Image (cartoon, helix red, strand yellow):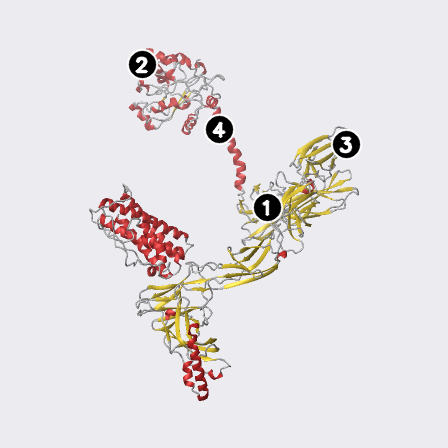
Amino acid sequence: MLLRDCPVISKRKPESMALFAVFQTTFLLTLLSLRTHQSEVLAENLLLTPEAFKVSVNSAQRCLHLQWTVHNLPYNQEFKMIFQIQISRTETSNVIWMGNYSTTVKWNETVHWSWESELPLECAAHFVRIRSVVDDARFPEWNFWSSWSSWQEVNVQDSTGQDTLFVFPKDKLVEEGSNVTICYISGNIQNDISCYLEGEQIHGEQLDPHVSTFKLENVPFIRKGGTNIYCEEKQRKAISNGTVLFVSKVLEEPKDFSCETRDFKTLICTWDPGANTALDWSKQPSQSYTLFESYSGKKKHCEEKNRCNWQITQDSQEIYNFTLITENYLRKRSVNLLFNLTHRVHPMSPFSVQFENISATSAVMTWKLHSLGDYFTLLCQVELHGEGKMIQQHNVSVKANGKYLLNELEPNTEYVAQVHCADDNHFWKWSEWSGRDFTTPEAAPSEAPDVWRTMKSGSHNVTLFWKPLSKFHANGKILFYNVAVENLDKPSRLEHRSIPAPANSTELTLDGCSYQIRVTASNSAGASPAAVIVVPAAPGNKEVEEEIIEGTEDGFSMSWKPQSGDVMGYVVEWCDRPQDPLCDFQWKKLGPNTTSTVISSDAFRPGVRYNFRIYELSTKRIAHLLERKTGYTRELAPSDNPHVVTNNLTSHSFTLSWKNYSTKSQPAFIRGYHVYLKSKEEQCQPGAEKAVLPDDTVCCQYKIDNPEQKTFTVENLKPESFYEFLVTPHTSFSEGPSGTFTKVRTPDEYPYMLVHVIVPVVICVVLLVCGCLLKSQWMKDKCYPDIPDPYKSSVLSLIKSKENPHRTIMSISDCIPDAIEVVNKQEGSKIQSLGTRKSLTEPELTKLSYLYLLPTEKNYSGPGPCICFENYTYNQAASDCASCGHAPVSPEAPPSQWGLLTSSENLLKALEKNYMNSLGEIPAGETTLNYVSQLASPMSGDKDSLSTNALVPPPCSEYKMQMAVPLCLASPPPTENSDLSSITLLGPSEHYR
Amino acid sequence: MKVLAAGVVPLLLVLHWKHGAGSPLPITPGNGTCATRHPCHSNLMNQIRNQLAQLNGSANALFILYYTAQGEPFPNNLDKLCGPNVTDFPPFHANGTEKAKLVELYRVIAYLGASLGNITRDQKLLNPSALSLHSKLNATADVLRGLLSNVLCRLCSKYHVAHVDVAYGPDTSGKDVFQKKKLGCQLLGKYKQVIAVVAQAF
């Protein structure tokens, strides 16, 4: 039950009834005296009952305002009274609240009291009654309760329709986190009704059949536009009505409230206002802020919600007691602040910051301050910043203008100097910073550049390298490097060379003399000290064996043994990127007493081999190679296997070669190789071990421990067998990847031998054939020369002129026959067919005819020339003439008769006379010639003929020309009398030329 | 009543700038005198069609902006809260004559103009930060004013109709916030529905 929110008007004095009161008081006193004596209590109860009891309603604030008077009190006296109030809801018997209200009451005074209902008053009718008792020690006899007043009904349900759903309260403003009771009045609506808050159902209790109430506890702030609460009729599926609950954020107490002055004219008070409690629909504006100063009694409404300016008057008020009050419709809060004005001085920021006398290492900073009066001393803080960080900080106590000398500055450096000040006597706050930047001028470089060199072996080319000076030592922008070369062996002019920055190397071509090289770095202010290095005439670098060192991720730790006592120091050189052509040459110089160091570089990578050279620098500044080191920061497993070539493949062995495999460019030290061999054989050869591969296959492993051995011969293999091999390098901790095996098949033994025999033979044959083809004409001339065409003979022209043009006859003058032997071997049936006189051109007559021209033994008197020829070309026609046999030529025929033979008849006669039996049957006009070539090899049958004829082979087969013999004459049937040995026709004496 | 005077009445005065515009106007006889302040646009019907199309194109966006700004339960209970059951909305018959349609359109626009004025006023108080909604409401009201002028011009110039009886929606100034939200949502739902029919009818 909230009583504080409802306005309560306590008492009021109606003066107009004073006269009546005099009489009444007199009457009452009379009555009292009577009561004292007569104890008439009942009547007095009635007299003290509150009268003129009225109840009014403020439904928006859910308040009942009660007012009443107590008439029967003595005039002009105050009585302490207690009023007891009962409030019922819905019906008089349902008392929901009863309480006492104590106050002092005068005669006929109207008393006011308010009561706030947690339930909206529209939700139900309320009934109120009151009674009183005098609670005053002066009148103990009146200490009894009066009678109850009559019930006063309060009902604000005036405009509600019976068929409409109403939700109360309407547009209520509440504070976040508070508890709110709402209700709906359903009138005659009988449907089931559900209510929701922003979509979530809320559950309540039924006040009567038409009214339900919902207690919402700790209501949240959802939006400035309010929280929607609505009720839905389930059957109609309609949202009949609702209400909007405007939930305000809780008004917060202002935080960090403080006031200060910067000029003793205005006090600036600031605070953190917290959340804005403004709501839409003008339900609540933003909270207001008011500043109240208790000493002066002044008040100021603040326009801004987080600051307020207070004008300082000239009455020299030092102490201020401020109260900051904030309020909204629901709440009011305040904070207090008591302070001395002089302790809250926040100086204005310094101005006109300047720098004077800026040198390479110092500068004077000056600034000005806004005056706060002669009695104020300010503490100023000067800060010097360089490269983004504070370098120096100084405190200076000043009155009006400040000045400070900044020392220990670096040349050619940009600085920022800033200053801020505060009250030195009562520190309150620093002012804002004021500052400026400045740059110190350049100075000559303070240190010689770090110089080193590389020398190509066998030449006098020297490459000088130098490292750029650090900013600390450069003292400005290095413009160029000066290189001065001086010949130490013979007096000569210094050679100067100026190399513009940022170059970091130069190449010098020297002769065989010793040289001293001096390198300086120069900026606009001057040159640095010189770095001196001596290049001897003969480098004299001895061969130094390379030592393997083990690196780590942090670098390479190495040590060396000094060789001579007088050393200036040591130099370790290496390449950060040894695989690159430029290699990123590096060096590190060490003192004379150092014999070990750790070389580290961000460029070092695992699996890269780094080579280090350690030089000793003599006091004459000559470098001698001391040691060589090589190693990896971390060795990696080889990523590639060698590319292997198979050589010398035989039936029992083959050779593997990987000579192009570079061991020095591998990601680890190669310790050797493993050769894996797969075969169908279960046993490994001697020198091999069985090994199980990652895929669980078993093979033979040959180990090669020499990394430079890059060939391997696998022996004792079987012919015509398949083998698979893999060569992989191995390091101290792993081996190369398990790559693909290469297949090899050993060849058969015999084909191998055959190849060695057949190939040369074939080559020879081919060469021979080619030779023959190239010399075909020569071969033809030698082996089968052309036979003259008898048809083209001059004899024919003679015959043509006299006889039948078809008659072909050899000119005797063109032939020098020694002997003519006509051989004819024909089947008997074909001999018989001669009588049918078939034409020579008929195809079935294809039997060969041979005509041998041989000297007869009898007539052959010496080693004269002989002729024996056969030509199939000519023989063709003759052999085709089945009707004609070989015509034996009589050797007795005189040479003159050959002239007659130009006539077929004569020739026929000559032949007929000695050897022929049936010549007369051959017509003269059908005679043809049959040529027998000497070079034509006789057929087997012909050989038989030769043997049967006992023909003596001529000792010489040379002939000068061929001779045509009429076919029909040259083929007599082989009779018993006609022995072939007897057909020698010509003796040496009949040899014509 | 102060709210009514501050919101609806100025709007109506703007809509009916002529003398006597605040009171319902009877349809004058066809041959009655009818004068327009400015000559009507030559292509008046096209302009009316374009304005209707413009309103139809933006009606749904306005509806969505509105119910979204009201918060729950509006976006998820459109059928229960924003159904187009506005009982006193002027009728419109799409199959009537052009004159009848124009007269009905005039009533519809007048009704909508007044209601939109109420909604705009309420929303500026209730949702002062919903700037896009305010902008859309203002733009719609602007087009409605132009359309009303054009329709009246057409009625006057072609059909010699100088006065049309109009009716306005219920006064929402005395309603509670929830009822204002709900009535505005119902009105905009109805507007979206009607303007589609009207745009199609012309």
Cβ atoms under marks 3 and 4 closer than 8 Å = no
- Residue A525 image-quadrant placement: top right
Q: Are marks 4 and 2 on the same chain?
A: yes
| Residue that carries the numbered disc 3 in the rendered image | A488
Instruction: Give how far across and how far down residue A76 sits, in percent.
Output: 47, 76
Which residue is under mark 2? A804
How many residues crowd around disc 1 within 10 Å: few (fewer than 14), some, or many (20 or more)? Answer: some
Disc 4 target residue = A769
> At x 44% / y 21%, what residue is drawn?
A785
Q: Amino acid at mark 1?
A: Glu
Q: CA distance from mark 3 to mark 1?
A: 65 Å
Mark nearer the N terminus (4 vs 2): 4
**Amino acid type, label 3:** Leu
Image quadrant occupied by the C terminus of chain A: top left
Tag 2 secondary structure: loop
- Between A543 and A229, the one lying in front of the other is A229
